[in-house]
Amino acid sequence: MSERESMPYDVVIVGAGPAGLAAAIRLKQLANEAGRELSVCILEKGSEVGAHILSGAVVDPKAIDELLPNWKELESPLNVPVTKNEHWVLTARKKYNFPHALMPPFMNNKGTYTASLGNVCRWLAGQAEALGVEIFPGFAAAEVLFNEDGSVKGVATGDMGVARDGTHKPDYQPGMELHGRYTFFAEGARGHLTKELKRIFELEKDAQPQTYGIGLKELWDIDPDKHEPGRVIHTQGWPLDDAWGGGFLYHQANGQVAIGFVVALSYRNPWLSPFEEFQRWKQHPAIRQFLEGGKRVSYGARAINEGGWQAVPQLAFPGGALIGCAAGFVNVPRIKGSHTAMKSGMLAAEAAFAAISADRAGDVLADYEPAVRSSWIATELKKVRNVEPFVAKYGSSLGTLLAGADMWMRTLRIGLPFTMKHHADHEGLWRKDLVQPIDYPKPDGVISFDRLSSVFLSNTNHEEDQPVHLTLKDPEIPTEVNLADYAGPEQRYCPAGVYEFVEEGGSPRLQINAQNCVHCKTCDIKDPTQNINWVVPEGGGGPNYPNM
């Protein structure tokens, strides 16, 4: 085995999303203010910054205001303010406007912007690099490195040029080790290194299980006469029955709308397909009217944290910290998390800079967690902490009423005197014989589409001759348990056609089409026996989202 080279840094950051980039910028700002050198690097598994970023997005600029007060002068992509905010309740054929006057004030989108979060990250990367941050796109952090005392030493990137059978191809290159005095993990929802760190350091022992939704999104060029820049629409109700979730339609720049659908992964019916629910939702007359005469130009999917405040784990451990969606700071009813993610990165940066200034390394950043728990992140998330569990337990109609009442009471400082609990998403699936299969309509190729044509628009690419990054702990479970008991739910919950059961010698076998994977992490979350373990493929693989 070739020996890996190593590079030392003061701070190593895994992931060039909003949290990782905000942390890097804040570290460099503090170093410049103190007149000292500070080395900071970011590893990004996507082929470029933004390639793996997918969000609605309606962005609350609160954290950007703090981080870069002059951001409006820096050619920011936040240039379409929200001008019209609507919430629709859908039935199979009709829509009903839900009055915003009935919602708590913090639920309005005043002062927010609709934009591509991928482009926001590209812009933040430019600000970071101008300050001297080193960003390495196309390099996936594949392994956590530890010091002899058990503290985090840094990370190692994955080897390149490894064949599917594990042998070294002619272009083989061993991974690189990046050592940091502190390492921030900003991998996003269900990061594979974060999952390992949670286990090793028991970071979730005092927290509720994290819960998730899957968000599916498309970009459309629409008829200019139908386009209203800044108009934001959210929907709930149809077509979901067993599950809860909803859709969004945002009128963004350049004559485009971002449309998407979120399904909570706590659903019970193994026949449910989030992808098909999204395609069915687009056929609703109220949604279809915007898309007719338009053209779909991009598609993607990503898991979203939905566990709220009670699912936030311990944030700091020897030598490292969790920031952003790796920890889980999404405000579920507001459908926003980039602002809280950025703020957590900034607070971690301040704690790390103070520690490095005191010549510390590899210990617990004890100031970070109290800073988060006394910040506006906590204030915001505590108000909405019962929303997801109310709706998950009581359904969309009654759950929404109870969640709304709880939010209003907390707004008036008389909130309910308890915090509801969660169950892990994979525990809720019912056996196939307990529910009826769902007969989804076939795609028309105009408004609704199939998976493979959708994956094509995600620009997903993986080197085919490499180890499969969707690993099975037991290769027999997919047929003996998942197919037998749950009708093979992986072939429906995956939004990219990665999993399919094929006949081989008269018996079914699970085929894994890893090259289709859009890195959403749904399989790692929803697999009923937790038999699927998602790990990183070669750096640069996966989707290449243009402006998602």
Image (cartoon, rainbow, N blue to C red):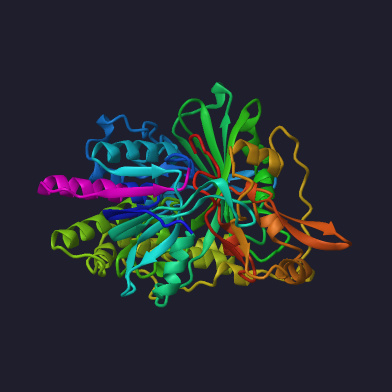
Q: Residue at x 50, y 71 (%)?
A: 422
User: Exactly how many numbered labels are in the figure?
Assistant: 0
Task: Look at the image and say whether residue 25 sits in the magenta stretch.
Answer: yes
Q: Residue at x 33, y 33 (%)?
A: 76
Task: Look at the image and say whether residue 152 sits in the magenta stretch.
Answer: no
Task: Report x, y in % for residue 428.
Answer: 63, 70
Against 200, residue 297 (above or below) is above
Q: Nearer the viewer, residue 176 or 355?
A: 176
Left or right of 90, for residue 390:
left
Q: Quadrant of residue 323?
A: bottom left
Can residue 419 be seen in this snapshot?
Answer: no
Q: Which residues are magenta?
A: 22-46
Task: Report x, y in % for residue 112.
Answer: 36, 41
Task: Report x, y in % for residue 463.
Answer: 60, 44
Q: Residue at x 46, y 52 (%)?
A: 174
Task: Report x, y in % for residue 212.
Answer: 52, 60
Q: Quadrant of residue 522?
A: bottom right
Q: Nearer the viewer, residue 372 or 494?
A: 494
Against 244, residue 497 (above or below) is above
Against 402, residue 107 (above or below) is above
Can residue 497 be seen in this snapshot?
Answer: yes
Left or right of 259, for residue 269:
right
| Residue found farthest to the left | 35
Q: Nearer the viewer, residue 234 or 75?
A: 75
Left or right of 378, for residue 275:
right
Q: Residue at x 34, y 73 (%)?
A: 150
